[in-house]
Image (cartoon, rainbow, N blue to C red):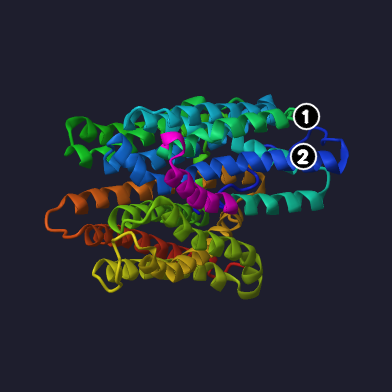
Amino acid sequence: MSHDSARYPAGLRREPPVAARPSGGEARSRRTLAVLLMGGFLTVFDLFVVNVAIPSLKAGLGATIGEAGFVIAGYELGFGVLLIAGARLGDRHGWRRVYSFGVLAFSATSLLCGVAPDAPFLIAARVLQGGAAAILFPQIYALLRALPDETGRRRAFGLLGMTLGLAAIAGQVLGGLLVGADLFGLGWRSAFLINPPLGLMVMVLARPIPNQRSRTTRPIDWTGVALAALGLFLLMAALLEGPAHHWPLWSLICFPAAGLLLCAFVGWEHRIVRRGGDPAIDPGLFHGAAFSAGIAVVLLVYSAASSLFLGFALMIQNGFGLAPFAAGLLFAPASVGFVIASAAAPGLRVRFGSAALVAGPLLYAAGIAGLIVTAFRLSHGSVTGAGTGDSGGCAMFLPPLILFGFGQGLSMTPLLNLVIGSVDCRRAGMVAGIVSTAQQLGGALGICVTSLFFAHVLASPGNGPAAAGYAGAFGGAMLFNLAAVLAAAILIRRMTKGRPV
């Protein structure tokens, strides 16, 4: 869900397309669009398919709750850190060529995920898979912007947004079906092994697409990318694995090491700017209060997305005993609500102005509160059959899930325009890349907090039956999400006060 049309904004590329547009007419444009939508579908599907597969994966590999969280966070981390670099690679070497390479890398890393012998191997493969997704995804926007006519481009981006929403739904529902069907005894592995044949098909179909590129590019700031990636990796590793191993020495060392690396990253970016170079992230952008507040909103809103689905999947499968497919079906209404709200958001913003922007996080928070209350009722026997694998009682989650999805769509869809509108339009490409990175890192942060809370609550004595223990862990973890989206509403109100939207 957290992976919608706002999560992957147009404008990731740093330079506008200057090469000749593709020729071959409307039929070629349709083929190009279909191939690009398939690639976008795969990247979002593989984030959300893991949510319903986590309990099966956790049992099959003997993974800790921290390792299970890192299976999701690793993908988002690899994706978020390398988005800007992925956009630059396409500008320099050609969008179709880099897109095809990214699809190949995504297929290969998916295969590694599917054959993982243990949790650490799977986590490493997921980080690589996220990096591959970051290479291929910016090229989708570059190539769609090069379609022959303005009407076709608007339609293409609209279809891309709907495709990403459907990919989120499919990740929950089809992921549950794949895991539940246990094809060839593969269990959760089939959720990854389905990607290589699809990826190879996309590569073949992408060959006729012209290999356009931008003529004006600068060297990629690989030093800055490496410093940020390593610093964030150490921070996440300590947060996720430290509690599971009772805070060993290596986890404690990771915190100051991560801080030093991230400070070095900031210093390096300032140095690049002073020398007239092109940094991975221009520190000057954060001098504007509106932009800094906008990035904080993005982090807060997206920290409450993937983490909620992780916690919810653990609760309804491990706590209430639902099968993976039934659990996946419960996620679908939230995704439908998200798609509807995303389509309605532009019109609501025109009609109600800043009030519509603030309403999104408030509805988001109301949905989260409804899920907490419903989990408490079910876990304490208010509904007969809760915790026994009977999905009838769990149907009570549907109203708050729909409300949650609707609020999430209203919150996420307008964020990009709100943040980009606070800076010079000539920097829109870099800003879009920063926003996308913040989206991924916010999701990883939320998963860290949720994983820490679940590990603490479930390890404590006296939690009672499984349903009550998991519901308590879910409710406690969601208090962070509730606080995050309410804080986002306050920041949005301050950002839009006295400003046309």
Magenta stretch: dominant SS?
A: helix
Lateral position of residue 258 relative to residue 420, left or right: left
Percent x, y for residue 269? 48, 33
Range covered by the magenta-colored residues: 165-186
Q: Is residue 264 visible?
A: no
Asked which quadrant contains residue 77, the reply is: top left
Residue 313 against residue 284 in the figure, above or below: below
Q: Residues within 10 Å of mark 2 (few under 14, many from 20)?
A: some
Q: Residue at the location (33% across, 39% down)?
A: 236
| Residue bearing the label numbered 1 | 208
Please say whether residue 331 is one of the residues in the magenta stretch: no
Q: Residue at the location (35% across, 27% down)?
A: 117
Mark 1 or mark 2: which comes first in sequence? 2
Total labels: the figure holds 2
Mark 1–mark 2 contact, CB under 8 Å?
yes
User: Tag 2: residue type?
Assistant: Arg
Q: Residue at the location (37% across, 34% down)?
A: 233
The C terminus, quarter of image: bottom right
Q: Is residue 132 visible?
A: yes
Percent x, y for residue 275? 54, 28
User: Considering depth in this image, is 117 or 452 the residue closer to the camera?
Assistant: 117
User: Tag 1: residue type?
Assistant: Pro
Give the residue at the far front of this rendering: 184
Q: Residues within 10 Å of mark 1 (few under 14, many from 20)?
A: few
User: Considering depth in this image, is 318 or 428 the residue closer to the camera?
Assistant: 318
Percent x, y for residue 84? 56, 36
User: Considering depth in this image, is 269 or 85 the residue closer to the camera?
Assistant: 85
Mark 1 vs mark 2, CA separation in Å:
9 Å
Q: Which mark is residue 53?
A: none
| Residue bearing the label numbered 2 | 31
Secondary structure beneath disc 1?
Answer: loop
